[in-house]
Image (cartoon, rainbow, N blue to C red):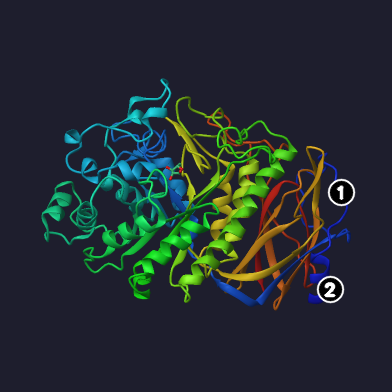
Amino acid sequence: MFGRREFIRHSAVGAGALLLGRSTPFAGASDSGAADSRIEVLLGEPLGTISPDIYGHFTEHLGGVIYDGIWVGPNSKVPNVDGIRKELVDHMRKIKAPVVRYPGGCFADSYDWKDGVGPVDKRPQRSNFWGDIEPPSSPASHKYEPNQFGTNEFVHFCKLIGSQPYLASNVRSLSAEDFYRWVEYCNSPAGSTTLAEMRAASGYSEPYHVRFWGVGNESWGCGGNFTPQEYAVEFRRFTTWVPRFGENLAFIASGPNDDNWDWTRGFLEEIVRKGPDQLRSIYGLALHYYAWNLSRGRTRDWDEGKGDALKFDAVDWYELLREGQVMESLINGHWQVMGEIDKRHQVKLVIDEWGPWYRPGSEQTSGNILEQTPTLRDAVFSGITLDIFHQHPEKIAMANCAQLINCLNSLYLAHEDKFCITPVGHVFDMYSAHQGGQSLRTMFSAPSVHYDRDGKAASFWGLKGSASVHDKDLVLTVVNPHVSEPRETEIAIRGASIQSGAATVLTHSDIRAHNSLDHKDAVQPQTKALEIKGRSLTYAFAPASVTKLALRLG
Ligand code: AHR
């Protein structure tokens, strides 16, 4: 057993080069005594409660997300609940989805919520923000918004899956009054306003109690092309008086892209120019971060730099994971800048778009723009990202994976009556056990991965993850990024003994493995009971894997 000081010394030491050939497809509990890695979970060092809201989702009127993904219509032969795909509802209940963001994305700043309410057959057909880049093969509903799915249908979807709605308002092309009226439509009590009557006429007399409101989206770009100072003025104007109807409204400001520290600083400085009390009007600052540049340093061009979702080698695997690890420096960096102005850290981060973004070509359904097929690599990326979120519970109020279905880092893919869970969906299912747990300081020590990056030596960390506890139940999630080597690991829980446990492992002998509409089960998690001997546990983490250890403590 390693003491803490010795452990820290080992954490800093990387081991020699590892080969990229694959040896062990599924590892597990082990007592070979050859552990080269250590994990130490410190029960006495809680970091804060893991907000369930970091397990949020994002849905946009874009490609196949809404039409065909979520909404099949009440007359469809696809099993549905009031027009909403039933299989999706069932799975989202299982993963305990806490919050869903809607209707965009860039779409939000060209959307008039009034088009999407009232009698369905009277709703107008409009151009869609994304219409100009739709290929000829995409269905008409993607290019021209039919408004069959709007606020009522979205809130109904949220109710069915047990989620809170998070609505993004239009700052670029509608007024502050339109925003207030949307709040009034959603939240005014039954019988109180004309808009409450209108809601009731659609069958929803009770208010929706929408708490989370985004004030624009990517206001530095598609959401209005504002400077941070200009946007701060708009934010103040939009949020200065909003009808509350007894709700504790939470306004989320459009925040920075990637490492745009100037946006964070410029926005907050302008906000407090009217006094520090103004900070109280901001629940969260939305950070967007997509991992897209797999060019290995060759370019920063958005189109040229992207990689392929399905065709990649071990180096591309590590490159994506490195891009994923950047999330942690963005959280720390923006938090530091926020603290220069918001000294008491009243404003939290809301990471309401995250995930990998590849070039087109891996769509399961031709014509679904921005649809890509997630592989085991994206599952590992998602595990790394969620583990990072767990380690910063005091900073992150919410996060929303982009996007839920048929788009980017999808948890699910669907077309007509076909549906599958992607490896990313399996990670959300496995990790849901962390929701509401107390995050614990956890130390990892493992030999680094070394690889050849176009003739230059490169390395990546060897083992990482996170731990949380609810009463006597401890959840430890761990990523082994090595494409071919298992990591034999000694695990110590400081402050308790392990009574029993089970391991759930998501891996595959092919790092490109994925599920598709025709082969739904290629990548599946496997669960096995653990044999516990003594106070610590030795476990071999499979190569290219995400593992959850669910441990019952004594
Ligand atoms: O998720 C796709 C798009 O990415 C969103 O509409 C936008 O906010 C971001 O640029």
On the image, the x and y values in percent for residue 273 come to 36, 69
Q: Residue at x 40, y 36 (%)?
A: 62
On the image, the x and y values in percent for residue 543 come to 76, 47
Residue 196 to residue 407: above or below = below
The secondary element bearing badge 1 is classed as: loop
* Residue type at the position of mark 1: Ala
* Residue type at the position of mark 2: Glu
Does any atom of ligand 1 lie closer than 8 Å to the CB of label 2? no
- Which residue is identified by label 1? 17
Image quarter where the N terminus lies is bottom right
In contact (CB < 8 Å): disc 1 and disc 2: no
Few, some or many residues within 10 Å of mark 1 (<14, 14–19, 20+): some
Of residues 26 and 65, the one nearer the viewer is 65
Mark 1 or mark 2: whose residue is earlier in sequence = 2
User: Mark 1 to mark 2: distance in Å?
Assistant: 23 Å
Few, some or many residues within 10 Å of mark 2 (<14, 14–19, 20+): few
Q: Does the rendering let one see residue 485?
A: no
On the image, the x and y values in percent for residue 405 come to 46, 40
Q: Does the rendering let one see residue 247?
A: yes
- Which residue is identified by label 2? 6
Quarter where residue 21 is shown:
top right
Quarter where residue 104 is shown:
top left
Of residues 337 and 310, the one nearer the viewer is 337
Q: Is residue 14 rendered to the left or right of residue 170?
A: right
Image quarter where the C terminus lies is bottom right
Q: Residue at x 41, y 49 (%)?
A: 218
The secondary element bearing badge 2 is classed as: helix
